[in-house]
């Protein structure tokens, strides 16, 4: 991990625990700062969250991997003679197929795919608080997969108790694309995923993204939208916005927050641009805020 980001990692884990306790179930979370560890953007994150007590409803173990690269197949689920199931996932879109394959090997699981800007209505069920040691091992990168195009984990099916289900939610990341995966062990019955607007805060870190080549070295950071737009239009480029705001309580330099439900807010010429990226050639995404953080 990038050493300069260690403090941010600790704060994000603390925020995740507080968030899960407040909602009585794990919501999507991530480690977007891990993009600084790669040459490209973060494209896929997995959050494995399990219930751990009344004060903290879940403890999360997080690993960040990339979704880029050619996958041989979307997923593979195998089981050995000791009842250990090995799960390898490279493409998260076939939620129904993954559910069927897991259940065929006696892994009680429900897998749901959630589009960007939405989430499953909570609570869906009661999180399990007495998880036996060895039920699962946290997901990790696939050995030899230099592109980081997926993750693998193992589950001991002999340690499941009757009436327990792994609930896997596969969601499109509303900031960077790719997909987030949260996995929670719950008690039956588990309610179906009812899609509702995503009001969860998503972290957008300050970090050195790849250079926005279409701007030819023109810097947008700290300028107003009114100052930046003429330069972008002069180059014949399209503009999109990611509306953000500083966190209510922060240390200087903390990341901005994005709420999907606020993305329809009109952007004024006096708004500030604090970062930009180029999600596709010829399209500049300005990350804007009404109030800049102090350095």
Image: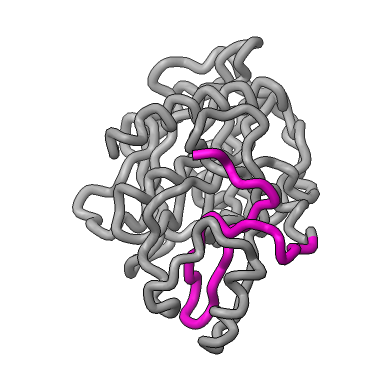
Q: Position of residue 282 (x, y in %)?
A: 50, 82
> Would residue 37 appear left or right of 293 to someone viewing this image?
left
Q: Is residue 57 magenta?
A: no
Tell me which residue sits at (42%, 31%) in the image.
9
> Would residue 128 appear left or right of 158 to someone viewing this image?
right
Q: Position of residue 27 (x, y in %)?
A: 63, 36
- 111 or 201: nearer the viewer: 201
Residue reaching furthest left? 144
Q: Is residue 85 visible?
A: no
Question: Residue 271 occupies which quadrant of the picture?
Answer: bottom right
Question: Residue 50 occupies which quadrant of the picture?
Answer: top right
Question: Residue 283 occupies which quadrant of the picture?
Answer: bottom right
Position above or below: 230 against 96: below
Q: Which portion, as a residue range, is magenta? A: 266-295
> Would residue 15 appear left or right of 41 to someone viewing this image?
right
Tell me which residue sits at (67%, 56%) in the image.
243
Position above or below: 120 against 136: below
Tell me which residue sits at (62%, 19%) in the image.
57
Q: Position of residue 157 (x, y in %)?
A: 45, 30
Question: Which quadrant, please, contains the N terminus?
Answer: top left
Position above or below: 208 against 139: below
> Would residue 283 appear left or right of 9 to someone viewing this image?
right
- 235 or 109: nearer the viewer: 235
- Scheme of colours in the image: one colour
Tell me which residue sits at (42%, 54%) in the image.
42
Q: Is residue 101 visible?
A: yes
- 54 or 29: nearer the viewer: 29
């Amino acid at each position: 991990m990038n050493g300069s980001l260690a403090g941010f990692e600790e704060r994000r884990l603390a925020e995740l625990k507080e968030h899960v306790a407040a909602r009585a179930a794990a919501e999507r979370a991530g480690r977007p700062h891990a993009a600084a560890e790669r040459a490209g953007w973060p494209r896929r994150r997995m959050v494995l969250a399990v219930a751990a007590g009344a004060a903290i409803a879940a403890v999360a173990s997080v690993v960040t991997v990339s979704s880029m690269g050619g996958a041989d197949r979307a997923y593979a689920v195998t089981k050995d003679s000791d009842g250990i199931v090995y799960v390898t996932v490279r493409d998260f879109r076939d939620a129904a197929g993954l559910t069927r394959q897991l259940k065929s090997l006696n892994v009680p699981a429900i897998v749901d795919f959630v589009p960007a800007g939405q989430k499953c209505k909570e609570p869906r069920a009661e999180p399990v608080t007495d998880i036996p040691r060895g039920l699962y091992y946290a997901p990790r990168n696939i050995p030899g997969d230099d592109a980081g195009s997926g993750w693998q984990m193992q589950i001991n099916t002999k340690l499941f108790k009757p009436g327990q289900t792994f609930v896997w939610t596969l969601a499109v990341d509303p900031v960077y694309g790719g997909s987030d995966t949260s996995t929670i062990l719950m008690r039956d019955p588990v309610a179906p995923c009812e899609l509702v607007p995503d009001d969860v805060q998503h972290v957008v870190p300050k970090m050195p993204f790849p250079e926005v080549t279409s701007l030819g070295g023109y810097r947008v950071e700290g300028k107003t939208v009114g100052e930046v737009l003429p330069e972008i239009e002069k180059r014949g480029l399209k503009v999109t916005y990611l509306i953000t705001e500083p966190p209510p309580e922060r240390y200087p330099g903390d990341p901005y927050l994005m709420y999907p439900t606020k993305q329809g807010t009109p952007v004024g010429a006096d708004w500030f641009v604090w970062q930009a990226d180029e999600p596709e050639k010829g399209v500049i995404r300005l990350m804007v805020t009404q109030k800049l953080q102090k350095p």
